[in-house]
Image: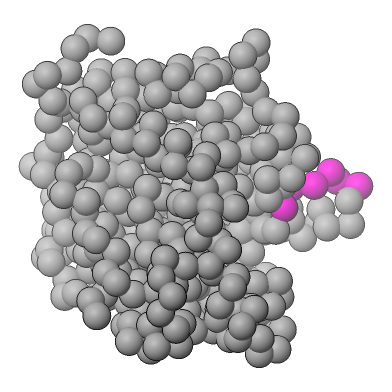
Amino acid sequence: MTLHQCGRVGDTFVPAALVLVACAGRVVPPTAAAPAAPADIVATVVLIGDAGAPKASGEPVFQAVARILADRPDTAVILFLGDNIYPRGLPDSADASFADAARRLRDQLALARLTPVLFVPGNHDWHRSGPQGWERIRRQGRFIAREGGGRARLLPVDGCPGPATVDVGPRLRLVLLDTEWWLFPHEKPAEGSACAARTPREVIDSLARALHVAGDRQVIVAGHHPLSTGGPHGGYFSLGHHLFPLRNLHPALFLPLPLLGTAYPAIRGLGVSAEDVSGGANRVLRAALDTAFACAPPAIYAAGHEHSLQVIDRGRPPLLAVSGAGIYGHESHVEAVPGTRLAVSKAGFMRVDLLRDGRLRVGVVTVDRTGAPSEIYAELVQARRAGPGCAER
């Protein structure tokens, strides 16, 4: 059994325990790229996702981010990749849960004292896809603008799908998307709204145009949902998922229910949730993004959603960076999928450095409980060139 055959119990009738015991569950190759000299780094983007429940006593992952950026405050941006407030976004100030939700977001905003901070929305920010989602994502945007000291923004704004463009210096461009807009089942901005793009076709046309006009800049497109994943949202589950399914409701529910536990991943694999890659709306989203990338692809597509660190090369750009392990102790199971370069279930983040020669260096950094960072993997992405067949849009 190869790593690429592991974990998708919903696709076969192989006994779950046999499959999962045979699977390694993580892949950590040696670091592939040497560290860059500080003088060779033009700009830095930290990719950190699913950080919406930081420890009130001090979040180790945030401490590690501050350490690595201590010498680069003027050339760095921190990008939070959604699920910025667990479990259901930012409620009204009269709600009993508001104070803790606001504290969780303020802990992330504290990093804006060091360097500018950007946020994209995730499904939990949209009321965990609940009926108050549009209201809560707009409230979060206003809170970030008010509390961020002019150095933090939630983009795209007001529940709009995007794309929103931010340049990090003259040679690196971020193109930010609200991917939950595609999946959200309740009221949201649509035709007739103030958003620049209001339909899926308008979003994809705008994204393709933004990539085309970027020219020879390196481009990172970022949204919450990954295009490929070896985690639970991709149908890959651990032995613990199969034996203790109630822990999906609360981590303390260690009641063994192996038959029910095996049924849960199988049902997830049927596409019942739009948040999983098997969901119909999720398939439409991913196919649409690939259509936009066909002519002038970005160097990297960055996402969170899975509580792990993954680097996936599908054999064509963009390189997929899944960085959703942004709080210590909140990691989830992960396995290799076709194209996996790295998959690890550890807290941490990714650091993308633009080098003077035009290449991007992608480093994967894990964090221990003391906040000490450790780079476990890195690779270089070549300077971007627009596709020669791209027509003017």
Q: Quadrant of residue 96?
A: bottom right
Q: Is there any visible trace of residue 223 in the rendered image?
A: no
Q: Quadrant of residue 223?
A: top left
Please tell me which residue lies in front, 283 or 357: 283
Image-quadrant location for residue 386 = top left
Residue at screen point 45% across, 27% down: 164
Task: Identify which residue is drawn at 61% across, 58% down.
Answer: 52
Image x and y of residue 220, in percent: 31, 39
Q: Is residue 221 magenta?
A: no
Residue 32, horizontal then vertical, whole percent: 13, 67
Position of residue 207 relative to residue 241, above or below, is: above
Residue at 39% in and 31% down: 288
Q: Is residue 78 left or right of residue 121?
A: left
Compared with 290, 115 (above or below) is below
| Closer to us: 85 or 322 | 322
Magenta segment, which residues?
Answer: 88-94
Q: Quadrant of the N terminus?
A: bottom left
100 vs 31, left or right, is right
Image-based side of 68 in relation to 176, left or right: left
Toward the viewer: 87 or 336?
336
Residue positioned 55% across, 61% down in the render: 268
